[in-house]
Every structure is written in structure tokens, then in C-alpha cells.
Image (tube, rainbow, N blue to C red):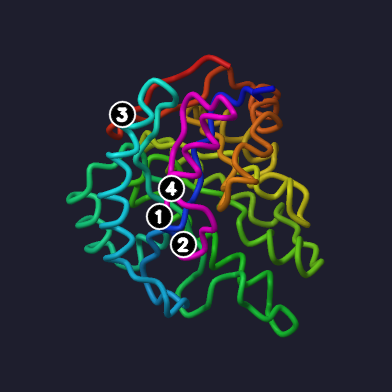
Amino acid sequence: MCVIIPFDLHTHCTLSFDGKSSAEDMCKRAVELGVRHYALTDHIDLGEFPDPDFDLEATVNGAKEQIPALQRKYAGSTELLYGVELGQAVHDKALADKLLAENDYDFVIGSTHFIRGHEDFYFLDYTDTDVTELLRLYFEELLETAEWGRFDVMGHITYPLRYITGDHGIDADLSQYRVIIDEILRAVIKNDRGIEINTSGLRQKFGRMFPDADIVRRYRELGGRILTVGSDAHCTDDLGKGVAEGLAAARECGFTEIAVFKKRTVNFIHI
């Protein structure tokens, strides 16, 4: 029986350094699930990237070659969006601007996986880390990214909690960052950009979405209306997981529409 999942706007294939399934297989799975609006948003991480196997040129060119062909092949079955998850854009704004100018993306997620002078939050040793200071620096970089504003939605705003709390069991009280989180959301809104509900945490140790409903609701209260939902799947088994829960959370936070991008232009789909 086909499971109907209307959107999944944050996924990865083997074009990402950490992807497990091919672009073709991810598209086939999206069709099987009845996903009407589907985005492949493979990683382009800028700055001092910690993975020596990451090949920026190969990733960019691979997507440029494969995605248009798959769009043609699966037209009528799913709307495949040519996306990218652009990490740490403010670490190299010139290169970020060049990538955006040279590639005809439908959809750009602006994410931060590591902050200046540190490894990805995945690799950090939290036994000797001042988590309070680390999160302060993280939110400062998110604010810088929000003010730069050349993305479409800001990805997984509370990403570090996947590891700080989920993997290492360290409680992180985000109430002390309320002021800067509001600044980030206001900057996103001022630049007519959006945020995402990233459902990957629901299937991980963290057990919650990134960000949780409090931040999504606050974004709405401040006037935000551009919201996407994505599983952050890196393999076919995870594609679409948590999206139903993400849509339910969106409704609970006051949203009646989800944003879908085509050629960097937002369209709203009623939920």
C-alpha cells in the first residue's frame, strides 16, 4: 500500500559525502511513497571542512549532471527539486556567492554544521567542552548567516543538540539564548527567508525535531510564514520519516501552508 507523504524537502544521496543511496534510488523511493514535492539537497560545506574525502567540485558537478536528467525521467511521478544544503556559507561568502550564481538551484538550505575554529558538532569531544559557550558561538554564526540571507530556508536551527543532548546526554537550556534566537528569526523574516522543520531527530537518540515547536511557534508569532519540512534522509530507508509528524507540528504552531521552492521562488501548498 502506498504511503502518501506530500513533501520531503531535505534529503541526501551519494552525491553527499555521507549519503548511502544513489540519487536514482532516492527518487524511486520518493515515487513509491507518493511524495509530490521532493528535493535532493546534497551537502556543499564551506570553510575548513573536516572530512578529507569531501570533493566540492565532484559534488557540484555530479548534481548538475544527474538531477536534471532525473527531473525529466520522473516528471509526472514526483516534482524533483534541484536543491543544495549550503553549509557555513559565511565562512567563505565569495565562494558561496559563486556557487549560487553558477548553479540553477531550485532550493537552497542554509545550514551550520561547525563553527569557526571547531570541528563538526558530530566530531567534538564534549567531555572537555564548555557547551554554554559553544552554543553561544553557534547562535552568533546563525545570526551572521541569517543576516547574509542568500539561502531560502535556514536548516535544522538546533542542530548541535543532536550530539550534545542526543548522543552525549548533556542537558542544554536554550532559554538563555532566547534573545539571540529571536534576533535570528527576525533577520530571517526581514530577508523574506524561512526555516525548516527537520524531522531527523525523531528517529535518532534526541527524539525531537530540529527545531522543536517552541521555536517554530515563535517564528510564526514574529511574522514568519515560510516553513518547509524535511526528513534529512541519507538513505532510502529514512526518506519521508517523520514528515507526517512535522506537518502535524506545523499545524499546531499555526501554519496552514508549507513552502515549496521552484527556481528559488516560493510557492505555498495548503496543509
Residue drawn at the location 43% of the way across and 35% of the way down: 189
Answer left or right for 228 relative to 61.
right
What kind of element bears circle 3? strand
Where is residue 57? Give x, y as percent.
27, 65
Q: Is residue 234 above or below residue 50?
A: above
Which residue is the site of mark 3?
A: 265
Residue 23 in magenta stretch: yes
Q: Badge 2 is on which residue?
A: 141
The amino acid beneath tag 3 is Thr
Going by the image, does 234 lie left or right of 204? left
Query: Which tag, 1 or 3, sits closer to the chain's start?
Result: 1
Which element carries disc 1, helix, strand or loop? helix
Identity of the residue drawn at 35% across and 62% down: 90
How crowded pointer 2 is (Cα within 10 Å; few <14, some 14-19, many 20+) is rated as: many
Q: Earlier in the sequence, mark 4 or mark 2?
A: 4
Q: Which residue is mark 4?
A: 23
Q: Residue furthest bottom?
A: 128
Chain-order first, disc 4 or disc 3: 4
Residue 174, image x and y in percent?
A: 70, 54
Looking at the image, is mark 2 or mark 3 nearer the viewer?
Answer: 3
Q: Which mark is residue 145?
A: 1
**Amino acid at circle 2:** Glu
Q: Are marks 2 and 3 in contact (CB under 8 Å)?
A: no
Secondary structure state at the residue bearing disc 2: helix
Q: Position of residue 220 (x, y in %)?
A: 57, 29
Tag 4: residue type? Answer: Ala
Cα distance in 3D space between marks 4 and 1: 28 Å
Q: Nearer the viewer, mark 4 or mark 1?
A: 4
The quadrant where residue 171 appears: bottom right
